[in-house]
Image (tube, rainbow, N blue to C red):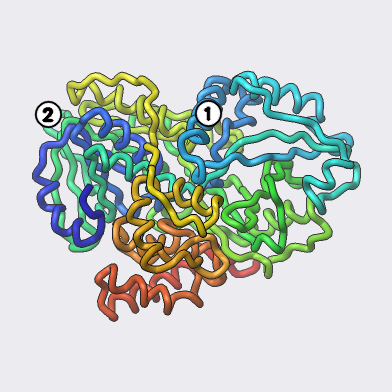
Amino acid sequence: MPTWNAAWRAQVLPELAQRDWDLIVVGGGITGAGILREASRRGWRCLLLEQRDFAWGTSSRSSKMVHGGLRYIAKGQIGLTRDSVHERQRLLDEAPGLVDPLGFLFPHYQGGFPGPRVFGGLLAVYDALAGRRNHLYYPLQQLRYLMPGIREDGLSGATRFFDAVTDDARLVMRVLGEARIDGGEALNGLRVVELLREDGRVIGLQAEDSESGQRFSFRARAVAQATGAWADGLRRKDGREHIRPLRGSHLLLPHWRLPVAQALSFMHPQDRRPVFVFPWEGATVIGTTDLDHADSLDHDARITAPEVDYLLAACVSQFPAAGVTRSDVLSTWAGVRPVVSTGDDSKQPSDEKREHALWIEPGCVTLAGGKLTTFRLLALEVLRACAGFVGKAVDDQGQAVFRRSDAVLPLDLGPAMRLRLAGRHGQALPRLAALIGELGGTRIGDSDTLWAELALACDEELVLQLDDLLLRRTRIGLLLPEGAAAELPRIRALCQPRLGWSDARWGEQQQRYLALWANCYSLPAHS
């Protein structure tokens, strides 16, 4: 598999634009990556184009949960829940260290809804769909050991069940890596300007390169749009269905400030929406909101001051003794969910169903909506819709998304770190092992990220901007204070030569990154 970096990109881009493609995928989030993965394994000549960076949109700014959608049962979406719990188990089995089980506790307070019996009944359906019992009720005495510090006024106990958690951006990179091994190609920094049509049929597209400003035309038998909240931009719209962008925002705290070993799922006291406090990457997340996103989709989404207050109020309601305030927040992120609406925007955002939709015109299929957990099934549905245009059949024997790697990592890293690295890097492990031998197994600051992972990303993960490296290839921009500002001199020493950037380019990128972090990943001004 050829090196995947900016120098390679600049060399091959004109040649890739001359090829005759079976399928071009537009959108480099988890759905687009999944489509490329499933097409490449079937021998399709396939290319993915992403306007910004892989996972730049929703797929690096989700709630990080791989779950079956427990609340969808109450909305009657049994099929969506069944598919989700089966795909969740597949990912747990195939990608340990990247997709990991996470216990969830749902507390029961006197007079609260749902109570233990109703919630237990809901979980019985959930477990039946998954094919295994996965929940248990804990009285208050035992709960104190499972979730120290939880508010005890009126608390009778809690029900524990299991879902899973992931690093969503790394999940996208793993899926893209598997697709590339099978011959698929993926490029970031290419914004699709328009779809090309002949006689009413889409026959390709024109894209603009963010690096050079050049425009390239690509021809394909089919185009699959997997652009999430951006899905309405290029397609020919008919009917009443459209994308309703909904923003979900999160706070990240240092783990020591609110140490939790599992997730707490509870109803917000203000509006009875489900919210979470859960461990992630050695820190603690509070999320999420669910609001209409009125800002331009061309800019990074950001949390608002009222959302900060809302999430802090949720935390205080369940952990009153912790006294968590704005000053404890390490970083924030906000993502935009691509929810398909039937046009009734008077509905509350949380009342919109999370089902997906396919919009088809000759030569082009647009996928809207959907869930991270079911990305494989969504990809297969898109391929079946494209099959007639491409002239190829699509079968499914349930093949694994991820290959296993036999690479050996240094034993002194410890079993937990070796599992983590195997999950996040898969087939790139031999190269990572060599870099660990060269640079050592030291971590960056208080994070679990190794300096060798940063080097690997520069060498072989198509980094075009500094935020690609610090917010998506690694997450140290979220996990370290001030976006890892204190580490930037050492990051520069390691990464600037590998990226081939001049001093001027590095200075420009660093300034841009710090401004982006301050504007979109830190706390907004207090209202």
3D distance between C-alphas at marks 1 and 2: 40 Å
Horizontal side, residue 122 vs residue 197: left or right: right
Of the numbered discs 1 and 2, the one sitting upstream in the chain is 1
Q: Which is more toward the observer, 341 or 160?
A: 160
Picture coordinates of residue 190 (x, y %)? Answer: 25, 52
Amino acid at pointer 1 = Ser
Horizontal side, residue 241 vs residue 261: left or right: left
Which residue was labeled with disc 1? 84
Q: Is mark 2 on a helix, strand or loop?
A: loop
Task: Identify which residue is drawn at 40% across, 41% down.
Answer: 30
Task: Identify which residue is drawn at 41% across, 27% down.
Answer: 377
Picture coordinates of residue 433 (x, y %)? Answer: 38, 57
Q: Are marks 1 and 2 in contact (CB under 8 Å)?
A: no
Query: For the residue carrying disc 2, how many other residues have a C-alpha within 10 Å: few (<14), some (14-19), or many (20+)?
Result: few
On residue 323, the disc is none
Task: Identify which residue is drawn at 25% across, 71% down.
Answer: 500
Task: Identify which residue is drawn at 73% across, 54% down.
Answer: 315
Up-down: is 422 above or below 88?
below
Up-down: is 279 above or below 236?
below
Q: Kindly tell me whether residue 254 is visible in this rendering.
A: yes
Which residue was labeled with disc 2? 199
Picture coordinates of residue 310 (x, y %)? Answer: 69, 54
Up-down: is 393 above or below 116?
above
Horizontal side, residue 234 vs residue 429: left or right: left
Q: Which is more toward the observer, 382 or 301?
A: 382
Horizontal side, residue 512 vs residue 255: left or right: left
Query: For the residue carrying disc 1, how many other residues have a C-alpha within 10 Å: few (<14), some (14-19), or many (20+)?
Result: many
Q: What element carries label 1?
A: helix
Q: Quadrant of the C terminus?
A: bottom right
